[in-house]
Amino acid sequence: MLGTLSAGGVLGTLTACGHPASPTVPSLSGAPRQSGTGGGDAGPARKDKLHAAADCIRQHGIPTYQDPVLTSDGHVYTDARSLQDASEATLKAVETACAAQISAAQFQPDAQAPAPAAMVQAGVKAAQCLRANGLPNVKDPTSTTFFTPGHGFGLTQDELPAGGKQDPVVQRAFAACRSLLNEATRLSTLESLGHA
């Protein structure tokens, strides 16, 4: 549930210490943009276009990038985590080579659709547990709370004590809430998001 996210994307780059407090990310031009991707076409043609865009991203320097997940209501969940280790030069190469495929697929590689209800509920249970175990500033996530697929919701710096993740209180709270944190993380995987 807690981690540092630094993801770059073809149409925008996200860098943050922890997860951002709001669902906006800076784009390459520096202007903020909404991180959610709204519903749209959920047909097989769009799924094929998402696959083609992901193939292009893999072929141009990010071989671990997974195919985005398209839900039945047209929301797209992406593998933003694979983008985090890519160099700026690689991201620019992907942007140049894959812009047409990404546009045709109607998605942003580093953006996420809203968190599904089951994931939010699991995140709320985990947040309640963390508060009960010494982290009173942890907020309940909502559908618009930023998350990283496969890594769940994060904690912002203002939710942690001064010692950050290494603080003994944080370590004890994570140990006490491990099963709830694991469930929220499991529900954030691309496979789970595809069945939400």
Image (cartoon, rainbow, N blue to C red):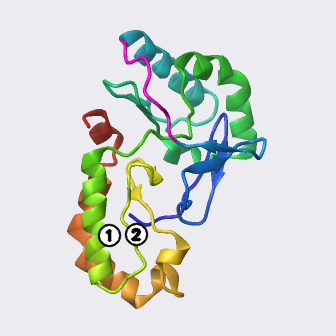
Q: Residues within 10 Å of mark 2 (few under 14, many from 20)?
A: some
On screen, residue 120 versus residue 63, left or right, reads: left
Tell me whether the residue at label 1 lies in contact with that at label 2, contact meaning CB atoms closer than 8 angstroms.
yes
Q: Nearer the viewer, residue 85 or 162?
A: 162
Residue 133 % position (x, y): 28, 84
Q: Image quadrant for the C terminus? A: top left
Residue 112 screen position, x and y as percent? 48, 41
Picture coordinates of residue 167 (x, y %)?
Answer: 45, 87
Q: CA distance from mark 1 to mark 2?
A: 6 Å
Vertical relation: 176 (above or below) 85: below
Residue type at numbered disc 2: Lys
Magenta segment's dominant SS is loop
Q: Which residue is mark 1?
A: 127
Compared with 127, 105 (above or below) is above
The secondary structure type at the circle numbered 2 is: loop
Q: Which residue lies under the disc numbered 2?
A: 139
Neighbourhood count class around disc 1 (C-alpha, 10 Å): few under 14, some 14–19, many 20 upward: many
